[in-house]
Amino acid sequence: MLAKRIIACLDVRDGRVVKGKQFTGLRDAGDPVELALRYRDDGVDEIVVLDVSATLESRLANRRTIEAIAATLDVPLTVGGGVRELDDVARLLNAGADKVAINSAALARPRLLEEAAARFGSQCIVISIDAQRTDDGYAIATHSATRAQARSPISWAREAVGIGAGEVLLTSIDRDGSRSGFDLELVRSACDAVSVPVVASGGASDARSFADALRAGADAALGASIFHNGEATANDVKAVCRDAGLTVRP
Amino acid sequence: MNRRVGIVALGAANRRSIDAALQRAGATTCFIEESRTVATCDALVLPGVANFGFIAGELDRTGVRSALLEAVGYGIPLLGICVGFQLLFEDSEEAPKAKGLGVFRGGVRRLRTPRVPHMGWNRVEPTASALEAGWAYFANAYAPDADVRDAVATTQDGVDRFASAAAFRNVQGVQFHPERSGDYGAQFLAAFVRSTAVAYAR
């Protein structure tokens, strides 16, 4: 039976892992290669690397960082940041990514997802969506959450999957770095709306919070600060998930 | 003896992951971007991460398809990974007009579970002694049926069971990604690299 995944996220800027709260106030959290390997040894099922300043600086995710991680890592690596065109996907795969996450560029030009799936297969293309609560429901923000968009994350997720995305990485901007638990309402809505795996992101507070997101229907739950601060390891999280009756990789 | 393992790299593979993993497994590697490189290799890997139809077209356009089949005919070991595994079969529902290499009998079909792609870690359960049981990383929306002639392992995804590994003579393939399957994948690739040396020692 397919196991639920525990994912560690490395937000990278200028070759260093950084972490803030609600996408701002970024502080240094360590060396990306060192952290990726430590989390791997601690039982993490996948590493996500997001170059958080790439889109804002109109460039692709830093390839040297990706290459350095990919050369030694032996669990899957998803990379996002600054993907604007089809060849950017190829560049990141050539640098060592196994899956590529697309965010702002896909919303601006949805056909990018269709073209990417036709060449690389939908299993390789992740639609990354950053969502925040508004007075009437949820709305998307792009460009590292600096640009609010008048679009529902759920309807966008449905459309993105319909044209080629094979996974949804759904981040709650409100919960990002807040350590207040995942936005379970958001997770449930997305899982009901699409037929591909959904990765819950934003708000991981303790091992129990991961189990809650997975029980709400997410196929994977992603954490950053909780791992950077050494408050729990992926294996700690998995022990709690197993007690909650979830299948996880030993 | 250090054998040269050629990785077919036709524009859409996660070439660097597989390259690094094969080197960790003790292989000397090279990338195959044109057909004449195939004959310089002692073993061949057809990796994953692409659309079935895209790679089938690239194999034809570059002439790598016929070079691979010729090498296989000479007894050169060939390993297919993910869509590279699927390409060893006759055809796929992902691209109905495209042709696989047809080394293994049967076709590849879409998975029959509510949530596709099948993404993450799952059990590889051997039906023959060729392979160890263990946890491996998958990322696939398509797979061959569990009862295809050459299956040597199967995997359960919800209500669906599919072939996750197959072997026939000097050709083998796996639906999972050994280059991203931790220690289990590393052991698998080390066994593949060792077996290529044995193939020449005979």
Image (tube, helix red, strand yellow):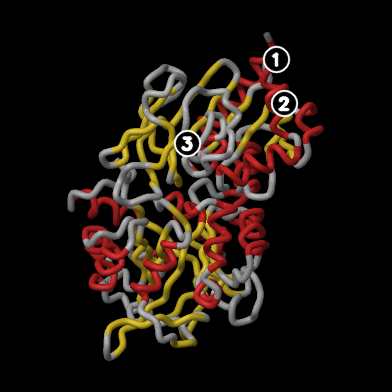
x then y, percent, for residue B68:
69, 28
- Name the quarter where the N terminus of chain A is drawn: top left
Q: Residue at x 50, y 37 (%)?
A: B92
> Which element type, helix, strand or loop, lies under badge 2?
loop
Q: Residue at x 35, y 36 (%)?
A: B123
Front one among A31 and B36: B36
Q: Earlier in the sequence, mark 1 or mark 2?
A: 2
Residue B195 shows in this picture = yes
Q: Do the residues indicated by labels 1 and 3 lie within the same chain of the protein?
A: yes
**Chain for numbered disc 1:** B
Q: Residue furthest front?
A: B97
Q: Residue at x 28, y 72 (%)?
A: A186
Q: Which residue is mark 2?
A: B3
Where A53 falls versus B82 (above or below)?
below
Left or right of residue B31, residue A79 in this image: left
* Distance between mark 1 and mark 3 Cα atoms: 26 Å
x then y, percent, for residue B127:
37, 20
* Distance between mark 1 and mark 2 Cα atoms: 9 Å
> Which element type, helix, strand or loop, lies under badge 3?
loop
Mark 2 residue crowding within 10 angstroms, few (<14) / some (14–19) / many (20+): some
Q: Do the residues indicated by labels 3 and 2 lie within the same chain of the protein?
A: yes
Residue B31 shows in this picture = no
Q: Amino acid at mark 3?
A: Gln
Front one among A170 and B54: B54
- Name the quarter where the C terminus of chain A is drawn: top left
x then y, percent, for residue B7:
68, 37
Q: Residue at x 72, y 24 (%)?
A: B42
Q: Which residue is mark 3?
A: B175
Where B192 falls versus A176 (above or below)?
above
**Chain for numbered disc 3:** B
